[in-house]
Amino acid sequence: MPLELRLGTADVAGLRFARSPLWETMEALRTLGDPRRQAFHLFWLRSVDRAAVAAAARELAPLIPTPGYTPDFLIPIPTGPTTTVDDDLATVAATPLQVVERELRICLTSSRAAPHVAVAVRALLADPAATLRRVVAAQRTCWDHLVRPYWAAVDDLLADDIAHRAAVLAGAGLATALDGLHANLSWTDGVLRFGGTAHGFTDDVRGRGLVLMPSVFAWPNVIAVTDPPWQPTVIYPARGVGTLWPPGPARPAGALGELLGTSRARLLAELAVEASTSTLARRLGLGLPTTSVHLRVLRAAGLVTARRAGREVLHRRTALGATLGGW
């Protein structure tokens, strides 16, 4: 059934963006077990140490069933534009036990709860305090192994997305910005609608604000969080997820690779279309300083050109570069 969020003028005026390492951690954990989400994350899937998170994943599995209810205390909404995983986990650890118990009971009574999930949740309800401690420890383990090694690149992509959305909001207005978040989102007459044009359940959230939060690992889903105490939040797929991870093994032409070096040959192959230094670094799995040095050499040789666009430098191969590579 479609969901509709009714917002007020003050909510729109106070709209803010946020990003959260704990949200990415929990969505990464979901991605491990959801083939629909894996298309853009094959490099990551091959890189992560699944054995290291196996016990933590089993601990958290009853709380993130598909389909089913996920307790809100598990993934707090950031109160500012960004947060650290330590801040997020401290918020989870400080959850009042009555809230933990209440939300676990919602898991138990959810109409979509599978029998094995219900059995596991009953065990968690036996000691909410111990459950909360184990949950926080499991989340820390998942962060350490699933997201922390990749966080710099992930966070850069999230920040780039927010900068783009903010520019659209300022230049084209709210309707264009919200409609562009996801194919299943639309904004009309003060209502943010999820899931098509048919009328569905309407949640009047006027006076509580609105948070927009891009996510790498939530792709291709869009998620709404509306229950207090959190501000109403829309978690949507970040732009450019397909450029986040390096491609498969490079296959530069042998002679070109020997002439330029493998990394410079790969850069030249990527630059049929303009790309920024940070985007190229992500695609090739190189550090930013290393990528900058290679690009400087290619520019000096007349194989690549560069231009500044705002705070970014965009690169593209020249006709000489294309000829050298045989493109």
Image (spheres, grey):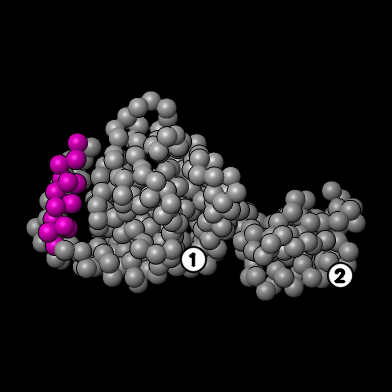
Q: Residue 123 placed where, x, y %?
A: 13, 54
Nearer-the-camera pick, 289 or 252: 289
Magenta span has 110?
A: yes
In the picture, the quarter occupied by the N terminus is top left
Q: Amino acid at mark 1?
A: Trp
Residue denoted by label 1: 151
The residues tagged by marks 1 and 2 sit, at their Cα atoms, a distance apart of 32 Å
Question: Which residue extends farthest left?
Answer: 126
Residue assigned mark 2 = 300
Nearer-the-camera pick, 134 or 17: 17
- Residue drawn at x 84%, y 48% as measured from the top left: 327
First in sequence, mark 1 or 2: give its number: 1
Instruction: Tell me, yes or no, whether the highlighted magenta stretch contains residue 216.
Output: no
Q: Can you see residue 195?
A: yes
Q: Secondary structure at mark 2?
A: helix
Q: Position of residue 240 (x, y in %)?
A: 58, 51
Q: What x and y, as percent, mark residue 85?
A: 37, 68
User: Bounds of the magenta span?
Assistant: 97-111
The reply to whether residue 150 is visible in this rendering is no
Dot 2 amino acid type: Ala
Give the residue drawn at x 63%, y 70%.
287
> Is disc 1 placed on a helix, strand or loop?
helix
What's the residue at 35%, 72% (across, down)?
Answer: 86
Q: Looking at the image, which is closer to me, 306 or 190?
A: 190
Main SS, magenta residues: helix
Q: Is residue 277 above or below residue 179?
A: below
